[in-house]
Amino acid sequence: MEGRRKILIMGAAGRDFHNFNVCFRDNHAYDVVAFTAAQIPNIEGRQYPPSLSGKHYPNGIPIESEQKLSFLIKSYAIDEVVFSYSDVSHEYVMHKACMVNAAGAAFTLLAPQKTMLKSNKPVIAICAVRTGCGKSSVSRRVCEIVKGLGKKPVVIRHPMPYGDLFKQRLQRFTTYDDFRKYDCTIEEIEEYEPHVEQNTTVYAGVDYKDILEAAEKEADVIVWDGGNNDTPFYLPDLYITVADPHRPGHELSYYPGETNLLLAEVIIISKVDTAKPENIRRVRENIQKSNPGATIIDAAMPVTVEDISLIKGKRVLVIEDGPTLTHGGMSFGAGVLAARQYGALEIIDPRPYAVGSIHETYRKYPHMENLLPAMGYGRKQVEELSASINRTPCDTVLIGTPIDLRKIIRIDKPAERVRYGMQETGEPQLEKIIRAKLRNFSIN
């Protein structure tokens, strides 16, 4: 490795691996000494295996805790640290840059275009300015539109490889049995299940070049369903970014969400049915100043339930999507909106009944109050989530997560699932934009 520039990649089990695969794996100029891991529980202490790391790394690459960042830079005389995870504030990024510089290394943010692979099929990318903006609903809407045009969409989902990286190299999901086959966490199933319910094939994994080649064999259109507020792994033919008026101003203050805002051809302002008009106006003004050429679409995201009687006049425990509440910073989600809309008597505070890592999550994210984050990064945490639910005294458990938790854990009281989708509220319509875009390809 003598003479090669020593690199450390800061990540969270996703973007970091992709950046390595595309920019560093077969690059003779660099020696990637280690990955560091943050954000996701228990993803450090592993190894990026030799089967994925390539000929220059016969022993694989260690994945260390980010807490060891300064130590690693100094111990291995690291030349450059590549920041490779998402949904953090601009201030957070610069704190990390200062830490890296103080330890003696350069701090790098790779240009997203340098990490985008080119597909031989049209690519529609759905990204966001923050976690929890509603991009998964938009992705499902895009798939519906593509199917309505007589074409087959295949979703490629942003990576969440929290287990055996070799086994998770290339995953294909078409049935619920596939979730068990790949031993998926709650966080993974939350993203895959809604697509599978709509009979849309989903790919995910670690090596996104191989994943793309597999998906292209059966797709007319590739739909990139982004994670957090990360940029796409594939070069988009249509770049859609979702902004959230419940968090006005965040579209200009989070990394790399602002990059998505600047690169987007279409920007969807979501949740206009529940956001304050002044917040919608502020987001629109920020978009028009930052990306005046973008087409803006207003979209409602209404919530629905099957049995209102389980909510009206009842004391409900609300469970919301974990990442949206944690590093997404939201203090409510679809479950809370449904509880209010359908007349719940009371939303129970579950914090006194939380156990184990769920209790610790409240300590780490004190902005969460009368709701329960659906954390499930492994079997032990799923068990702790189940115990926290069943310890909480309530009449009904209101599940506001994308996944139907009743399929994963035992809930010993009545439970109702909240569903939500995307509805454009005026012109322009997304279907017209997609139809026009696909005319440029021979598939139309």
Image: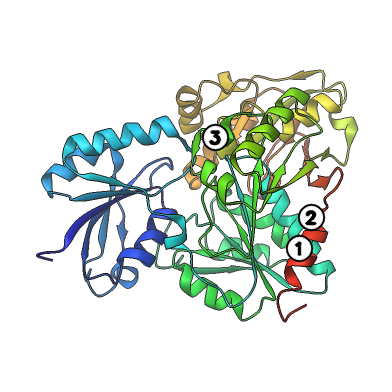
Q: How many marks?
A: 3
Q: Position of residue 92 (x, y in %)?
A: 39, 32
Q: Position of residue 415 (x, y in %)?
A: 76, 37
Mark 1 in CB contact with mark 2 (< 8 angstroms): yes
Q: Is residue 326 above or below residue 19?
A: above
C-alpha distance separating marks 3 and 2: 24 Å
Q: Which residue is mark 2?
A: 430
C-alpha distance separating marks 1 and 2: 6 Å
* Residue type (three-letter) at the residue carrying disc 3: Leu
- Rendered-image quadrant of the N terminus: bottom left
C-alpha distance separating marks 1 and 3: 27 Å
Element at label 1: helix
**Which residue is at a point 62% across and 36% down the rendered structure image?**
289
Element at label 3: helix
Q: Which residue is mark 3?
A: 252
Is residue 352 rendered to the left or right of residue 439?
A: left
Q: Quadrant of residue 164?
A: bottom left
Image disc number at residue 434: 1
* Residue type (three-letter) at the residue carrying disc 1: Ile
Whichever of labels 3 and 2 marks the residue nearer the N terminus, that label is: 3
Mark 1 in CB contact with mark 3 (< 8 angstroms): no
Bin the neighbour count of mark 2 within 10 Å (Cα to Cα): few under 14, some 14-19, many 20 and up: some
